[in-house]
């Protein structure tokens, strides 16, 4: 029997959406106020979903305490109260859109999970704007 467990987390971070190879006018045309050279911030909400077989011995798909610790170490510590463009090496040459942030988080978590577990990350940039990535 396959089941999905979920863990919510959050972090606050600043970013700027822009391409270094475009001038400010084109960045503003494409990214609007999100291209502000002085950055802007979000209160990101994260839902990490892990799908797998229920372990007969423990009754867990995954120990949620371990998932909580993994999210804390891999996402909350490095991302919280940071300027994503300036402080995270993953975004040195990658535009920190919600889509790209979700992929980065997925990759960080995927490498720490058992291969037989499926992973999905949902990242809310605002209560109404969110993305989901499952490795596809």
Image: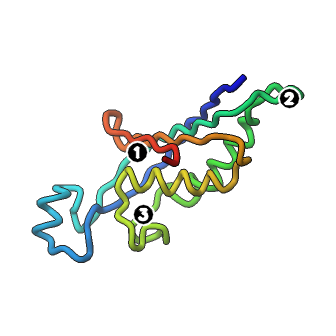
Q: Give the structural element (helix, strand or loop) at label 2.
A: loop
Report whether 130 appears left or right of 71.
Answer: left
Q: Is residue 37 above or below residue 101?
A: below
Real-space Cα separation, disc 1 to disc 2, in angstroms: 35 Å
Residue pointed to by mark 2:
58
Q: Give the image location of residue 59, x and y in percent.
A: 81, 25
Q: Answer whether labels 1 and 2 touch (C-beta < 8 Å).
A: no
Q: How is the image coloured?
A: rainbow
Are there few (<14), some (14-19), or many (20+) residues within 10 Å of tag 3? many
- What residue is pinned by disc 3? 84
Mark 3 and mark 2: Cα distance apart in space: 38 Å
Q: Residue at x 44, y 40 (%)?
A: 132
Mark nearer the N terminus (1 vs 3): 1
Question: What crowding class fits label 2: few (fewer than 14 Cα within 10 Å), some (14-19), or many (20 or more)?
Answer: few
Residue 49 higher or lower than 19, as above or below: above
Mark 1 or mark 2: name the one nearer the start of the chain: 1
- Residue at left offset 30%, top offset 62%: 16
């Amino acid at each position: 029997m396959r089941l999905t467990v979920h863990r919510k987390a959050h972090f606050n971070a600043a970013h700027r959406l822009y391409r270094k190879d475009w001038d400010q006018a084109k960045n503003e045309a494409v990214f609007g106020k999100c291209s502000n050279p002085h950055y802007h911030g979000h209160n990101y909400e994260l839902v990490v979903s892990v799908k797998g077989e229920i372990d007969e011995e423990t009754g867990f798909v995954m120990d949620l305490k371990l998932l909580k610790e993994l999210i804390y170490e891999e996402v909350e510590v490095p991302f919280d109260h940071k300027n994503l463009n300036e402080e995270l090496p993953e975004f040195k040459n990658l535009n920190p859109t919600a889509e790209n942030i979700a992929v980065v988080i997925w990759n960080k978590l995927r490498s720490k999970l058992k291969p037989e577990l499926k992973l999905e990350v949902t990242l809310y940039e605002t209560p109404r704007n969110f993305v989901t990535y499952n490795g596809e």
